[in-house]
């Protein structure tokens, strides 16, 4: 396809909207914010396509979703919690509270990672993509993916060390 031909945006959105939304929601923990970020991502992707061809839509869109979600976290915008009626849960309240607190801290810690590390971490752990899939999507070597993932995990462990303090006593 030449850059003069417009891609089938309906097909691109249909194919990738769910993944873009899931990435944003996992980072932001807000349906409203995830919807806003999803719209921003597709608008930005259209602009980027106008500037030059896009080789891998999945990589571009997941990366943009991750970066825009992290940008939103960095702006310290208040997070809107899901309503109780929006959730279906079979876990005990204390487990849900602990998971919610951990998710909050993970979101803050992700915002402190360099963009590449955050993107690789989200793609691997939230989207369950393999190292080779991430490599292809981002246009980097598998070794670069492994290195970024290792560094992201080490940095997150350091940032979230407060949760391990109770285990060591």
Image (cartoon, rainbow, N blue to C red):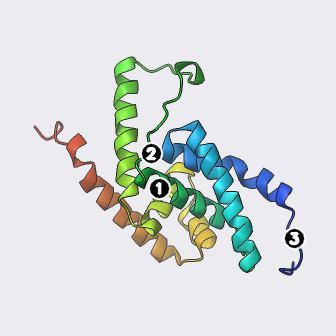
Labels 1 and 2: the sequence-earlier one: 1
State yes or no: discs 1 and 2 in contact (Cβ < 8 Å).
no
Measured in 3D between alpha carbons, the distance from the residue under mark 1 to the one under mark 2, in whole angstroms, is 11 Å
Nearest the eye: 109 or 156: 109
Nearest the eye: 54 or 30: 30
Q: How packed is label 1: few (under 14 Cα within 10 Å), some, or many (20 or more)? A: many
Residue 41 place in picture, x, y as percent: 65, 58
Name the residue carrying label 3: 6
Mark 2, secondary structure of its residue: loop
Q: How packed is label 3: few (under 14 Cα within 10 Å), some, or many (20 or more)? A: few
Q: Is 28 displayed left or right of 168 in the figure?
A: right
Q: How packed is label 2: few (under 14 Cα within 10 Å), some, or many (20 or more)? A: few
Q: Is 148 displayed left or right of 43 in the figure?
A: left
The structure residue drawn at horizontal position 40% and vertical position 25%, both measured from the top left corner, is 96
| Residue 46 sits above or below residue 13 on the image | below
Dividing the picture into quadrants, the one containing residue 147 is: bottom left
Labels 3 and 1: the sequence-earlier one: 3
Residue 123 in sight from this viewpoint: no
| Residue 14 sits above or below residue 7 on the image | above
Name the residue carrying label 2: 77
Measured in 3D between alpha carbons, the distance from the residue under mark 3 to the one under mark 1, in whole angstroms, is 29 Å
Looking at the rendering, in which quadrant would you find the N terminus?
bottom right
| Residue 7 sits above or below residue 125 on the image | below
- Residue 164 is tagged as none
Name the residue carrying label 1: 70
Measured in 3D between alpha carbons, the distance from the residue under mark 2 to the one under mark 3, in whole angstroms, is 35 Å
Residue 118 place in picture, x, y as percent: 45, 61
Residue 70 place in picture, x, y as percent: 47, 56
Mark 1, secondary structure of its residue: helix
């Amino acid at each position: 396809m030449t850059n003069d031909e417009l891609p089938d945006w309906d097909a691109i959105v249909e194919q990738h909207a769910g993944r873009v939304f899931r990435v944003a929601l996992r980072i932001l923990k807000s349906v409203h914010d995830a919807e806003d970020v999803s719209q921003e991502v597709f608008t930005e992707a259209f602009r980027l396509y106008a500037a030059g061809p896009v080789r891998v839509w999945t990589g571009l869109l997941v990366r943009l979703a991750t970066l825009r979600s992290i940008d939103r976290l960095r702006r310290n915008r208040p997070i809107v919690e899901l309503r109780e009626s929006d959730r279906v849960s079979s876990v005990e309240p204390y487990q849900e509270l602990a998971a919610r607190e951990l998710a909050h801290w993970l979101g803050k810690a992700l915002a402190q990672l360099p963009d590449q590390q955050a993107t690789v971490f989200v793609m691997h752990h939230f989207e369950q993509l393999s190292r080779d899939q991430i490599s292809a999507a981002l246009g980097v070597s598998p070794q670069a993916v492994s290195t970024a993932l290792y560094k992201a995990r080490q940095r997150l462990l350091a940032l979230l060390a407060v949760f391990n303090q109770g285990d060591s006593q």
